[in-house]
Amino acid sequence: MTKMTPELPIEVDSETGVWTTDALPMLYVPRHFFVNNHMAVEDALGPAKYAEILYHAGYKSAWHWCEKEAELHGLEGEEVFEHYMKRLSQRGWGVFITEEIDLDAGTARVRLEHSAFVYQIGKVNRKIEYMFTGWFAGAMDQILSARGSSRRTVAKQTQSGAEEGHDHGLFVVTPLN
């Protein structure tokens, strides 16, 4: 097994117990706890409705995170997107690999290996990592906005490691019409 050196600065306030990484308060919970809660909400709302809610929340959060990190580290353009993929990978969601990115076209293709959802749920023959889609569009749109572009994008999952015949997830970002 290869060890990923996280290089994440984790600080714990001894008085409050609050964990902080990248200047953001964090929660540290077991994967099964998060995924079990995620599946309970999906069961209650249905996958389509829950995916819609998570898309918008994830989009907003990714925009905010990318904006703050770009400012903090002096990053711009593709550097911001790559920094975001690295940090997501270091936080246990899976390993996110930018296969393609074209800021001028407003497109990207992200591969997800070692999905926390697939590890916990297994092969269920459907796309189960829809939680991430808004993250990619939110990151892309923040970067585009910082470059002065009014172009906006949408992201969707095209395959999942939870589907038979696939060992990884795949997400595409394309411009809105």
Image (cartoon, grey):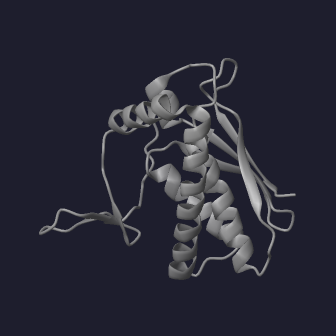
Q: Residue at x 44, y 37 (%)?
A: 38
78 left or right of 24 in image: right
Q: Position of residue 2 (x, y in %)?
A: 46, 40
Q: Up-down: is 87 above or below 164?
A: below
Position of the N terminus by quadrant: top left
Q: Residue at x 59, y 41 (%)?
A: 51
Q: Up-down: is 50 above or below 10?
A: above
112 left or right of 171 in image: left
130 left or right of 102 in image: left
Q: Position of residue 56 (x, y in %)?
A: 59, 55
Q: Residue 19 occupies which quadrant of the picture? A: bottom left
Q: Residue at x 55, y 40 (%)?
A: 50
Tally of numbered discs: 0
Q: Position of residue 137 (x, y in %)?
A: 68, 57
Q: Up-down: is 106 above or below 143?
A: above
Given residues 170 and 52, the one toward you in this image is 52
Given residues 7 and 92, the one toward you in this image is 92
Q: Residue at x 69, y 71 (%)?
A: 143
Position of the C terminus by quadrant: bottom right
Q: Position of residue 119 (x, y in %)?
A: 47, 28
Q: Residue 36 occupies which quadrant of the picture? A: top left
